[in-house]
Image (cartoon, helix red, strand yellow):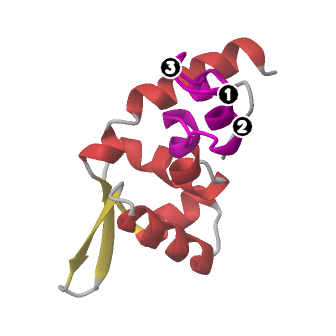
């Protein structure tokens, strides 16, 4: 996503004016990050998994998501390498989800957002 004037999109002084108008730079890290984790359900699931591994039904109860929505979100997060899935074959069969190192690295981000929300949101 190109955001005109956004500090992540400033063109270097060496670029010509023609280059600045014809080829907007790629998105910055903030925009790319939001593309990966920015949906409501992805954020909710990632936040719930900050406390450790959870079973599918535990996540479903904690997030209030439908089974279909939760399955889709978990598949997306697994594909993006934020979440791992572990199947336990013993009766009863259970599927567990946990954060990868990439997912765990979001802990300070969630903490910062919570601090910001405490200060600015009522």
Q: Find residue 17 and name its label.
A: 1
Figure quadrant of the C terminus: top right
- Residue at left 58%, top 78%? 67
Which residue lies under the disc numbered 3? 14
x, y percent for residue 74 = 45, 68
Instruction: Locate residue 115: give its quadrant.
Output: top right
The Cα–Cα distance between marks 3 and 2, rounded to whole angstroms, is 14 Å
> Is residue 45 toward the left or the right of residue 91 in the image?
right
- Tell me how many marks there are: 3
> Is residue 112 toward the left or the right of residue 104 in the image?
right
x, y percent for residue 38 = 60, 48
Badge 3, how many Cα within 10 Å: few under 14, some, many 20+?
few
Which residue lies under the disc numbered 2? 21
Tell me: residue 93, above or below residue 7.
Answer: below
Badge 1, how many Cα within 10 Å: few under 14, some, many 20+?
few
In the image, which residues are magenta?
Answer: 6-33
122 and 120: which one is in front? 120
């Amino acid at each position: 996503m190109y955001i005109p004037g956004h500090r992540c999109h400033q063109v270097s002084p060496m670029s010509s004016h023609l280059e600045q108008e014809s080829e907007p730079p790629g998105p910055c890290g903030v925009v790319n990050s939001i593309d990966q984790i920015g949906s409501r359900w992805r954020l909710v699931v990632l936040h719930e998994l900050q406390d450790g591994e959870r079973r599918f039904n535990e996540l479903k109860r904690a997030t209030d998501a439908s089974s279909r929505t939760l399955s889709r979100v978990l598949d997306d997060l697994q594909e993006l390498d934020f979440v791992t899935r572990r199947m336990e074959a013993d009766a009863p069969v259970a599927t567990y989800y946990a954060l990868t190192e990439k997912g765990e690295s979001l802990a300070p981000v969630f903490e910062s957002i919570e601090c910001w929300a405490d200060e600015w949101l009522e």
